[in-house]
Image (cartoon, helix red, strand yellow):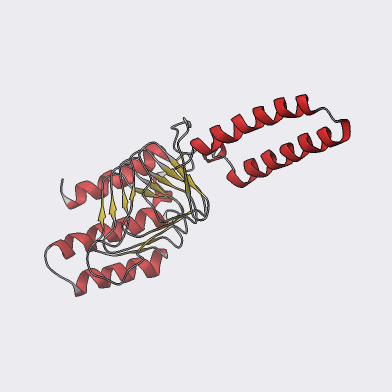
């Protein structure tokens, strides 16, 4: 596909999939993420031809106008959409697959000063929530999601969800719709609820002396806890 074929597809992707878009005219003023990709496409094409100064100049201009910093050497696939876009940083050796959705304040950064691959790889159909930080030469597998404000420093397998600081991988059968962040569990909340229920069982046993009931309730809670732990890597 040609350079302008990619750009045309980027614009059509927003028109087809963003319910907030009410007219083509809005694309020119209200979509910094789209324009960040626009500047990237040109700078990357020039960078691939062996030029260095001009691509960085175009990248800097794009950053000034959109507040999105994408290194010209990064590899970004087709139909990638940066929604809202403010504050997004995409490092030099980042690789992004097709149909990836990235929200504002996301960082795809490195953890090393060594040359070589030091930034993340996002495979196809990945969703990165607002404020998430994906750090290092790690891979976010196909169809996976990263919750808002999570910090991911380890690989995320396909069809999974990573949440928290540092992020934990949840391997449950979540809805594959791209925006179902409301279905991401709160790990800390679930653990606290388990501990509160366990304390309540113990208090009831101390007050009543009903150890048989305590053993039954404690066994049921343990099964719930074990299932929760096994759902995480």
Compared across the picture, whether 57 is left or right of 188 comes to left
Q: Quadrant of the N terminus?
A: top left
Which residue shows up at 45% across the image and 33% down it?
177
Q: Residue furthest left?
A: 49
Q: Residue furthest bottom?
A: 53
Asked if residue 28 shows in the view, the reply is no
Residue 25: percent from the left, percent from the top? 41, 49
* Number of numbered labels in the structure image: 0
Foreground pick, 4 / 205: 205
Quadrant location of residue 36? bottom left
Is 228 rendered above or below residue 139? above
Residue 129: percent from the left, percent from the top? 47, 49
Which residue shows up at 81% across the image and 33% down it?
205
Compared across the picture, whether 200 is left or right of 229 comes to right
Q: Quadrant of the C terminus?
A: top left
Q: Residue furthest right?
A: 207
Asked if residue 190 shows in the view, the reply is yes
Residue 106: percent from the left, percent from the top? 44, 57
Foreground pick, 34 / 166: 166
Is 157 rendered above or below residue 137? above
Which residue shows up at 39% across the image and 67% down it?
65
Quadrant location of residue 141? top left
Foreground pick, 101 / 113: 113
Residue 108: percent from the left, percent from the top? 37, 59
Is 228 rendered above or below residue 50? above
Compared across the picture, whether 200 is left or right of 2 comes to right
């Amino acid at each position: 596909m040609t350079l302008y074929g990619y750009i045309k597809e980027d614009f059509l992707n927003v028109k087809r999939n963003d319910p907030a878009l009410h007219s083509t005219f809005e694309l020119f003023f209200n979509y910094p993420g789209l324009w960040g990709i626009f500047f990237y496409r040109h700078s990357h094409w020039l960078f691939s031809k062996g030029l260095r100064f001009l691509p960085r100049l175009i990248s800097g201009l794009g950053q000034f106008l959109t507040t999105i910093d994408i290194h010209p050497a990064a590899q970004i696939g087709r139909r990638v959409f940066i929604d809202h876009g403010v504050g997004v940083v995409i490092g030099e050796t980042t690789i992004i697959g097709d149909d990836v959705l990235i929200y504002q304040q996301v960082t795809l950064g490195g953890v090393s000063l060594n040359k070589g691959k030091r930034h993340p790889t996002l495979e196809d159909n990945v969703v990165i929530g607002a404020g998430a930080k994906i750090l290092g030469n790690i891979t976010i597998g196909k169809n996976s999601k990263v919750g808002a404000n999570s910090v991911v420093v380890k690989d995320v397998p396909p069809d999974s969800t990573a949440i928290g600081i540092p992020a934990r991988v949840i391997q449950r059968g979540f809805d594959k719709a791209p925006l179902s962040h409301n279905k991401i569990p709160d790990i800390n909340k679930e653990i606290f609820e388990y501990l509160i229920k366990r304390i309540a069982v113990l208090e009831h046993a101390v007050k009543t002396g009903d150890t048989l009931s305590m053993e039954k309730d404690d066994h049921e809670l343990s099964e719930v806890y074990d299932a929760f732990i096994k759902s995480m890597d």
